[in-house]
Every structure is written in C-alpha cells, then in structure tokens.
Image: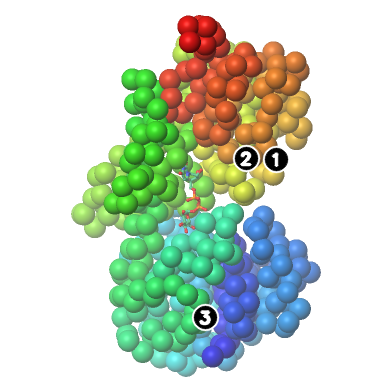
Amino acid sequence: MHKRICIFGAGYIGLTTAACLAELGHEVTCVDINSERVESLLAGHVPIHEPLLTELVVGNIGRGRLHFTTDARSAIEYVELVFVCVPTPQAHDGSADLRAVFDVIDVIADHIARGAIVVTKSTVPAGTGHALLCRLLHYGRNDVGVVSNPEFLREGSAVADFMQPDRIVIGADVGAWVKPVASLFESIDAPVIVTDVVTAELSKHASNAFLATKLTFANSLAHLCETVGGDASALFAVLGADPRIGDRFLRPGPGWGGSCLPKDTRALAHFARSVAAPLVQLECTIESNDAHFDHVVARLSEHFGGSLRFVRIAALGLAFKSGTDDIRESPSIEVIARLVRHGATVTVHDPLARPVGDALNGAHFSEVLDDAIAAADVLLVLTEWPEYAELDPHTIRTVSAARLVYDTRGIIDAHGWCDAGFTVLQVGRPALDFGDRTAHSTAA
Ligand code: UGA
C-alpha cells in the first residue's frame, strides 16, 4: 500500500531515498533548510552527480509523487512516516555531531501526526533512537514511534544500491512499529532483518568500520608486497577465492576516504571508547590509513633520493573514487597535501570533481589532462578513472618529459608502460624499471 512520507534532508541519502520511494509509488515530500537547493530541485536540477537520480527526481516530480519544500510544518501534516536523513558530521572530539537530527525532532514535535513514526536513516551512534524518543516525550509526544533504518548505499551507485540492497535493516523496540516501515519496501526483493534500535544503529557503523578495516589490511599487505617483492593482486586473488574472506573491498589504493568511511570509523571508535568498550583494532585501522598516505609519498620521495623539492607531479584524480564528483575526505587530498609539504610542484586533474575551498593546499588545478601531463616529471594516478587507465604511454613520451608513472590504483598496464620506456610504481608491487625490463626481455 502506498504511503505518505516526509523526508528531512536532500543530500545523498535523503534525495536518493526520496526519489526511490516515490519511484516505488509512495507520495514523498522532501524538506531541506537550504532554499537554493530546494528551488533547484523543484526545477529538476539534481545538485550531485549520481547515475539515474535526475531521471527519478524529474519523472516523479512530473507524476506528482515527489515534492520539495523548506516548510517542515506543512510537509508533515497527515504524514505517517518521517525519515531523518540529515548530516551527522564529525564533531571536534571525533564523535558524531547530532545537532541536525535533534533539530528535526524540535521542528516536528508539536506538529507530527498522532501514531506517526520517525525513521532514522542518518548514520547515528547507538543509543540515538532512545534519545530521540526521550526528546519526543519531553514535548509530551508519547504517541510517536522511533525506528532505525540504516542505509548502506554507495556513492556512484546510490539508486541501484537502494533498489537492490543486500539487506534491509529495521530496528524497532516496539513490534507494531516494524510493519509500517517494512511495508514501504514490499516490492524490493531483499532479506529484511528486524532487530532492536541499538543493534540497527550499530550495524551501520560496524559495516563501514569492517570495510575500512578490510581495506587497511589490504593496503598494509600491499606495502609488505612492495617491500619483499610480492604481487598484491595475485595475493588478493588467493585470499578472495576463500568465500570466508571474499574478493570485494580488497583492492589496494592510496588509502581509503570519502564522506562516510573516515567519519563513521572515527565516530564508532570514539563511541566505543566513551562507553569503556574500546575497539582497539579500529583505532589502529584509522592510524594505519594515515600512515599509508605517508607511505605512498615516502615511496615516491625515495625514488628521487629522499627529496621531492621542485619535482613536478601530475596528480591524476581528486574525487575519492571514480564515478563521483565528491572530494570529501578524498585520499587524493591527503596525498597532495603531503606532496606539497615535501616541496613538490603539483598539478591536479580530475575529469569530474573540482576543488573546493583550500582542498588543494597550494597545488594547481588543470581542467585539461594534457596540460597537467605535459608539465610533469611524474604521473601519479590517485583515482581509478577509466580515462587514466586508457592513457597511451607512447603518446605521453612524445609530449611530456615524465619517465615515471606511479599508479596507486593498479589500473594501468604496467608492462605496457614499462616497455614504452617508463619506470612504473604500483601499489602492492615492487618497482618495474625500464632498465630491468629490457635486461629481463633480453635474457629471455
Ligand atoms: C561507503 C560504504 O561502502 C557504503 O556501504 C555506505 O553506505 C556508505 O559508505 C555510507 O556510509 O554512506 P562510499 O563512501 O560511497 O560507500 O564509498 P566506497 O565505495 O565504500 O569507497 C570508500 C573508499 O574505499 C574510497 O576511497 C575507495 O576508493 C576505497 N576503496 C574501496 C578501495 O581503496 N579499495 C576497494 O577495493 C574498495
């Protein structure tokens, strides 16, 4: 049965949830405090780069099932379900800043319909649902439920992840609150895991923390391979073939980042310590990721005799992964900042993402890939964009003085580049030197 839903927050999670629930036939009003964003969405302009999202937004506005407004009070009239999808950024002490979540409760408490349910999709620490219930009680609202429904979608495949999720998690402490939420997703074919609110809240932080830990382990093993002459891609093929380990999220890189993994791992580590149940291994994971950024730069510096002063580097990729224009906590920014600190002259390129604020830490940005490459001594691949995998080393030799390529994403054909006269550094492999390669081919 189709329902009337109100969604607070028109960011990645809120907008995708709104568009997808409207697509499933529900009548959705999405509320955001940013009037410019609302105006732009009403005109059918989606402010983020996400496949299929614009089509869903425009199509469902047209069908009259999707509305955008800044007027929270009118939006929640007669609504059975209110989704909270507002940001929970990191506070100064590493904890999650929940002010936007509580602001929603403060705005709706006097107006929300009797019997309605507040559903949290924002990533929040365990115990938040209980705190929200208490806040509602403070306003005399003992007739409103609170359910946790964490979202596991990834940027770049948000719509597909929402529509075909691995699982749907519904955390409710009152049995009667489960069905209204579960019924929203009836037409989605995915296992539904019903649990209590605290466990549902933990499940989101724990998933991201597990993924971060897996990636850090992969990056540390890649470092070990570089040092002792192993091949990380073959190593991970062996590990990944064991279904207990699984082959996903084992691709080594420059370090992990993005809008969620760093903030959520820090929030969980902070939370666990604050309740005297520290996740020591997670704290090591976070430290180790930072050390990996240092290692990526140290390896390049070693190649130049220990100093990057005046070395001209084309840093290829600013987005935290390919398929998105999001640069929040991008590993590229971490690496670029370190290169600049070491005295390198860095020109950054990205096919989609653009620098915001002081993201480049003094590096330059070039919208033209050829220009960035032409002026470089080193090509440093930081994001796995297909256009970087397709670069032709023979052409580059004719237009650039660069004879070193450092591929932190493992996307280029190392032997092809080596044969074209480049020294190739790849994460998880020992250096492949042009000289070594010719000596090797001659011997063979
Ligand atoms: C992540 C989780 O994957 C989602 O399940 C979760 O819902 C989301 O955070 C969230 O909390 O909202 P996302 O931030 O879109 O999704 O990015 P990922 O695809 O997880 O990538 C995170 C980082 O790990 C990126 O820097 C990426 O380049 C890196 N990564 C990923 C690797 O270095 N190697 C891999 O094999 C996979």
Residue under the point 52% across and 51% down: 259
Q: Position of residue 94 (x, y in %)?
A: 39, 49
Residue 385 bears which disc, if any? 2
Cα distance between the residues tagged 3 and 1: 37 Å
Q: Earlier in the sequence, mark 2 or mark 1?
A: 1
Residue under the point 39% across and 33% down: 234
Cα distance between the residues tagged 2 and 1: 8 Å
Report whether the residue tagged 3 is closer than 8 Å to ligand 1. no
Q: Is residue 134 visible?
A: no
- Relative to residue 369, is residue 237 depicted above or below? below
Q: Earlier in the sequence, mark 3 or mark 1?
A: 3
Quadrant of the image containing the N terminus: bottom right
Q: Is residue 421 visible?
A: yes
Q: Are marks 2 and 1 in contact (CB under 8 Å)?
A: yes
- Relative to residue 29, is residue 439 depicted above or below? above
Badge 2 density bin: few <14, some 14–19, many ≥20, Cα 10 Å = many
Q: Position of residue 349 (x, y in %)?
A: 68, 33
Q: Which residue is mark 1?
A: 351
Residue under the point 71% across and 67% down: 55
**To which quarter of the image does residue 7 belong?**
bottom right
40 vs 101, nearest the viewer: 40
Q: Earlier in the sequence, mark 2 or mark 3?
A: 3
- Relative to residue 399, is residue 271 depicted above or below? below
Q: Position of residue 159 (x, y in %)?
A: 59, 64
Badge 3 density bin: few <14, some 14–19, many ≥20, Cα 10 Å = few
- Relative to residue 165, is residue 177 depicted above or below? below
Q: Which residue is mark 3?
A: 187
From the viewer's perspective, is the residue at label 3 or at label 1 nearer? 3
Spot the residue most to the front. 444
What amino acid type should be assigned to the residue bearing mark 3?
Answer: Ser
